Image (tube, rainbow, N blue to C red):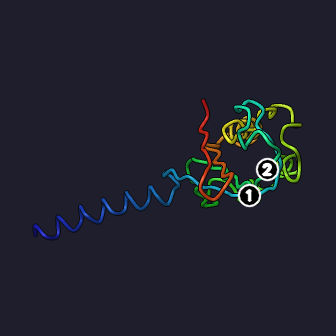
């Protein structure tokens, strides 16, 4: 009899947990990555610093969204929506001189991440982070102020 009681309680507990997850009552973070090629120079570095000269990067940017999973769709946001929302920014950044873009006069990775955040946050309220890779081994992540 004790085993039956434990089994019933366990089954009820498993049902509550799985039902809660099925209804979308859990939070996840998703990301979509993009690459673009841009040139820049950093105007505020010490004289003779290599980044003070015109150079370019194959930037990789990760757009991270966090939120509760919609119980109907099973996702936070459709990846194709994220791509469509980022496209106008991509077109402003790809194969352009970053220093000429208003707000990016000093286009460090840190400033670029913050600039992208400020452009996207009104369109993607679930935005949780913008990650920039300027090289394979160097970059930054901005999570808002």
Seen at 80% across and 42% down, the residue is 53
Seen at 71% across and 43% down, the residue is 124
Where is residue 51 shown, x and y percent of the image? 73, 42
The C terminus: image quadrant? top right
Q: Nearer the viewer, residue 3 or 36?
A: 36
Query: Are the two marked residues, 2 and 1, in contact with CB atoms closer than 8 angstroms?
Result: yes
* Relative side of 124 to 21, left or right: right
Which marked residue is nearer to the observer: mark 2 or mark 1?
1
Where is residue 21 shown, x and y percent of the image? 46, 58
Please tell me whether mark 1 sits on a helix, a strand or a loop: strand
Where is residue 89 shown, x and y percent of the image? 83, 46
For marks 2 and 1, give the CA distance: 9 Å
Checking the image for residue 86, the label placed there is 2
Seen at 76% across and 60% down, the residue is 80
Please tell me whether mark 2 sits on a helix, a strand or a loop: helix
Residue of label 1: 34
Where is residue 113 shown, x and y percent of the image? 69, 41
Q: Is residue 48 above or below residue 78?
A: above
Q: Earlier in the sequence, mark 2 or mark 1?
A: 1
Residue at the front extreme, as displayed: 48
Q: Quadrant of residue 99?
A: top right
**Mark 1 neighbour class, 10 Å CA radius: few under 14, some 14 to 19, many 20 or more:** some
* Relative side of 84 to 3, left or right: right
**Mark 2 neighbour class, 10 Å CA radius: few under 14, some 14 to 19, many 20 or more:** some
The N terminus: image quadrant? bottom left
Q: Nearer the viewer, residue 29 or 57?
A: 57
Checking the image for residue 69, the label placed there is none
Q: Is residue 68 above or below residue 47?
A: below
Q: Nearer the viewer, residue 74 or 62?
A: 62
Seen at 72% across and 44% down, the residue is 50
Q: Quadrant of residue 73?
A: bottom right
């Amino acid at each position: 009899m004790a085993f039956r009681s434990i089994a019933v309680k366990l089954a009820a507990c498993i049902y509550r947990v799985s039902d809660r997850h099925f209804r979308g009552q859990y939070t996840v973070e998703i990301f979509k990555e993009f690459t673009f090629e841009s040139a820049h120079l950093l105007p505020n570095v010490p004289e003779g610093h290599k980044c003070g000269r015109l150079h370019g990067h194959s930037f990789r940017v990760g757009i991270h969204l966090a939120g509760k999973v919609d119980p109907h769709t099973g996702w936070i946001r459709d990846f194709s929506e994220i791509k469509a929302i980022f496209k106008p920014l991509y077109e402003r950044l790809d194969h352009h001189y970053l220093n000429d873009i208003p707000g990016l006069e000093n286009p460090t990775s840190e400033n670029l991440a913050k600039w992208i955040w400020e452009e996207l946050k009104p369109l993607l309220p679930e935005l949780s982070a913008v990650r920039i890779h300027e090289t394979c081994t160097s970059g930054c992540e901005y999570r808002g102020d």
